[in-house]
């Protein structure tokens, strides 16, 4: 067993394949685990009808998503950057441009921007707000760090002819969030996740971000997000 720390939670992971430990290498810790996940052959076979490094990681990912819910945290498919020390998230279906947005803002704003995670960060609810934490799920570009950042804004990305940023209602944001998060299979953890998402949309402003690479000006969009 090895222990990986995600969003401040030490998780013990019992795995068969050495590649699984290598995947979590940057997040290994000597701390005692607060919870433990393991994988059985039957679970790998149910996932994709084979026992392999890939299916082991698939099962472990799902179990970690479930375990995190007990500690006010969850995994979400999004890219998160830190702008002037405040977090901005870009969520979208695969291929729409969440990682592209992160890189575009980095190019436009330079050292003011740090990429926290380019694919699947951990979000954690704390007493003073919602934070995004780096994770080993960095995507194909391997963008990310072990840093964390308080969230200032969450954006759902859509392509369009004109660039716009429209504030979303909590109900609309919650519906879209359910398509982006990793949903636990267990009823208890699923209920915990729903509660966390309800708090998320009530705490952090959500926007519908219509994008067009040729017309976007991240500086102006950031100024709009900072308005009360």
Image (tube, rainbow, N blue to C red):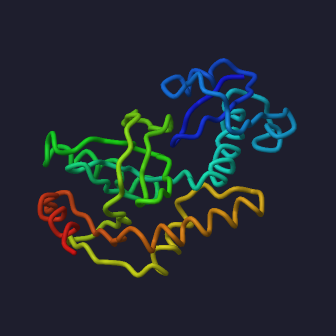
82 left or right of 203 in image: left
Relative to 92, say whether 26 is above or below.
Answer: above
Residue drawn at x 66%, y 18% as measured from the top left = 18
In the displayed image of the protein, which residue is found farthest to the front? 127
Residue drawn at x 55%, y 34% as measured from the top left = 5
Residue drawn at x 51%, y 66% as measured from the top left = 177
Residue 119: quadrant of the picture? top left
In the displayed image of the protein, which residue is found farthest to the right? 42
Relative to 11, say whether 104 is above or below.
Answer: below
* Position of the N terminus by quadrant: top right
Looking at the picture, how far across and down is residue 98, in whole percent? 36, 53
Residue 107: quadrant of the picture? top left
Looking at the image, which is closer to me, 161 or 218? 218
Looking at the picture, how far across and down is residue 199, in whole percent? 51, 70
107 left or right of 20 in image: left
218 left or right of 57 in image: left
Residue drawn at x 68%, y 51% as measured from the top left = 66
* Position of the C terminus by quadrant: bottom left
Relative to 58, say whether 180 is above or below.
Answer: below
Total marks placed = 0
Relative to 85, say whether 11 is above or below.
Answer: above
Looking at the image, which is closer to me, 224 or 101? 224
Residue 10: quadrant of the picture? top right
Looking at the picture, how far across and down is residue 4, in whole percent? 59, 30
Looking at the picture, how far across and down is residue 56, in whole percent? 72, 33
Looking at the image, which is closer to me, 47 or 124? 124
């Amino acid at each position: 067993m090895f222990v990986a720390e995600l969003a401040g939670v030490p998780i013990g992971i019992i795995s068969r394949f050495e590649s699984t430990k290598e995947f979590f290498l940057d997040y290994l810790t000597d701390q005692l685990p607060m919870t433990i996940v393991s994988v059985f052959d039957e679970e790998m076979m149910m996932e994709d009808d084979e026992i392999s490094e890939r299916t082991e990681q698939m099962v472990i990912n799902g179990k970690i998503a479930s375990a995190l819910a007990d500690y006010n945290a969850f995994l979400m498919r999004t890219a998160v950057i830190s702008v002037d020390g405040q977090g901005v998230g870009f969520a979208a279906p695969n291929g729409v441009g969440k990682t592209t947005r992160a890189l575009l803002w980095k190019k436009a704003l330079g050292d003011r921007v740090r990429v926290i995670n380019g694919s699947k960060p951990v979000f954690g609810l704390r007493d003073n707000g919602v934070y995004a934490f780096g994770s080993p799920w960095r995507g194909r570009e391997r963008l990310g760090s072990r840093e964390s950042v308080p969230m200032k804004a969450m954006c759902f990305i859509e392509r369009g002819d004109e660039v716009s940023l429209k504030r979303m209602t909590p109900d609309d944001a919650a519906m879209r969030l359910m398509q982006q998060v990793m949903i636990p299979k267990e009823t208890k953890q699923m209920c915990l996740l729903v509660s966390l998402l309800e708090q998320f949309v009530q705490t952090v402003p959500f926007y519908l971000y219509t994008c067009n690479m040729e017309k976007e000006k991240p500086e102006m969009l950031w100024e709009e997000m900072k308005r009360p």
